[in-house]
Amino acid sequence: MPVDLSKPHSDRRRVIRDSSAGVRQDGMHSREIEMKRNRGEISCAECRRLKIKCDKQIPCQSCQRRGCASLCPNGSLATGQGTRFVIAATEHLHRRIARMGDRIRQLEDALALLQASHSTEPHPLLCQNSFTVDSEKLDEQQQESEDDLAGEASKAFGTLSVSDHGVARFFGSTGGSDLLLLEKDDSAGSPSQNTETSDSSKGRNLPPQLQRFSYSFPFTPMGPVKETIALIRGSLPPWEQATSMAESYLENAAWIFRSVSRHQLLNEMLPAIYGKQAAYPPDDYNGPHDLALLFSIFALGSVLNVNLTTAAAESEGEHYNQLALAALCLQPVLEKPSLVTIQTLHVASIYNAMLGNDVSGGESSMESTWSLVALAAHLAQTIGLHRDPARWETDPKIVQRRRMVFWDLFIADSWHSLSTGRPPAFNRAFIDCRFPQEADIPTNLEPGDPMSINCWGFRFAYDGMAEIISRTLTATSPRYSTVKELDRKVRELQIPPQALEAMCGGPGVDLRSVPLPACMLAHTLANLQNVILLSLHRNFFVQALIEDPEDPIRSQYAPSFLATVRASKNILQKVEEVVRAQPVITSRFWTIWTCTFSAVVVFAFIATRGPRSSLANDAMIELDRGCSLIGEAARENRRAAKALIILNRMREKAHRALVAARNSPPHPIKQEEVDDEFAVFAGRTKKYIVQAVQC
């Protein structure tokens, strides 16, 4: 039957709407739905998406159980497989938290700077002063635009230092501090080094035969080996003196340099070499490299003996160092390395960094230290230390010893790579050696504690330092988003504060009452994060100050500027605390004063480049404070004495800049004008000519 077209039918009625009206009605419909959900009249958006029952409370029980109560009633997770659990789709929440955290810290920055312009007291809402702004969480939404913000900072490929005689050294973008300290100055020596040790620093007179072997390192010269071994054995100190130097090493150095344990030194090496009855069955310590390791420990133990004057410690230490080098050359180092060979080279590198040796004219040579660490690392791979020894070793003692030697050397290699800006010797892709289970480090934590100091140090070196090296010291400049990502990762690896407190005996304990190993280890671990952040951000810190000297906070690199300033201030504060607690031993550790030098240069740069900024006066205070600290150590430490000369020159420039800023009208500062010292510190690409000193 045909359809009667004369009768209207509801199915044939059509409503014609234009597209704009449809959009408006859709928007009104969405707002109406949201209002109903807010009133609890209909199911929440997340329950509707999952097609589950909703109790129409705000928040509903279902969202609370699933951990997404903050989304209820109108928010919902991304639709897709595996999104029935909140952990599967929280990326947008992390982005929101990051934006909120960044906004909070920007407001803290503004409040701190405003307060600093009116008063010297910190604002009540800020727990710390204007230098303690936390830039831990950064805005992730700006990642795409920040990838193109390299600018002038991308020129920080490193500096090539060339002397008058053609001797060249390369320092990468993080090696500016070491390059500055290479500058020659005839007054760089400390008083004790210029007077008392001028003759004695070469060590006591050795027979010509031993001198020939000592100066031939790392090669083996032609000569009577058996007679030379007899001469070296005849130079062993008395048993009482040997045990005293061994205890000095264990007390003052083994808290950070752990490749030689107390058990190996006191229960194996010393009894075996001196022919005493050992408490435990000793290994075979009859080779020349075993003697070399013992003499290297004597050398380092003498240098760190707090009961000796600096002059006497240096003289005695150099004597044993020459004997150690002579013993090393009695057996080919490159062709016949052993575990003891690696230990000896590592201990020798530590001694060389602290004092230098006769071959280098008594000057502390970080270049020789770098070479010794690199040689030890390459030989470590020769004997397979980078692979876990449990696969082929059955003796648990040897397994743990090999692991400890490797990871101690890995930390040294990473540290020197970061401080010089050069490639590391170890590649993480080829490493599967496990962390050692125990170590002879005196702490108040129980063995196996999850907050183990030892495991944290190894993990920080592997996941933190090595990660920064592999992503920032490459031939291609890192993007700024990469730098900020590494910043977050370093901060997440922070050592638990309760672990440091437990190591020092509890909160609020006076560091002067804490045993020396625990005090020094706590200081090193507490300051490690600041040192790494300073190295990571220094290039962008310099660029922020160049772009806007009067207000670097307005620069696109403001996060790096704030992170660098805060890290530098924390370094000075920590160093001041440990110097008050252990003044003698801290004056002899070169790493403390190298890091302090880098921190002080930061404040010198602020005062010199931005004398009209609101931070200039505070920076000048920190600059004077840092120079005072290094001045105290300069009386005993050669590197601190050299650093003090450079810093005094920078301080004079800073004072002149502040005076000129107060007495002259404002004038624009050319961004391309960067002093040589600051360009070197920032790792800018350039050729640096080192003039030789005319004697």
Image (tube, grey):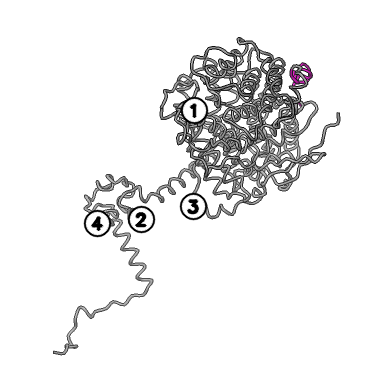
Which residue is tagged 3? 141
Q: Closer to the observer: label 3 or label 1?
A: 1
Kindly identify the amino acid type of the residue bearing the numbered disc 4.
Lys
Q: Which residue is mark 4?
A: 51
* Distance between the alpha carbons at the discs numbered 4 and 2: 14 Å
Which of marks 1 and 3 precedes in the sequence?
Answer: 3
Q: Quadrant of residue 563?
A: top right
The residue pinned by badge 2 equals 78
Mark 3, residues whose alpha carbon is within 10 Å: few (<14), some, or many (≥20)? few
**Residue 97 occupies which quadrant of the picture?**
top left
Which segment is the magenta one?
188-203
- Locate the N terminus by quadrant: bottom left
In primary-sequence order, the first of circles 2 and 3 is 2
Q: Quadrant of the C terminus?
A: top right
Q: Report the side of 617 relative to 193 (left or right).
A: left
Amino acid at dot 2: Ala
Q: Position of residue 113 (x, y in %)?
A: 58, 38
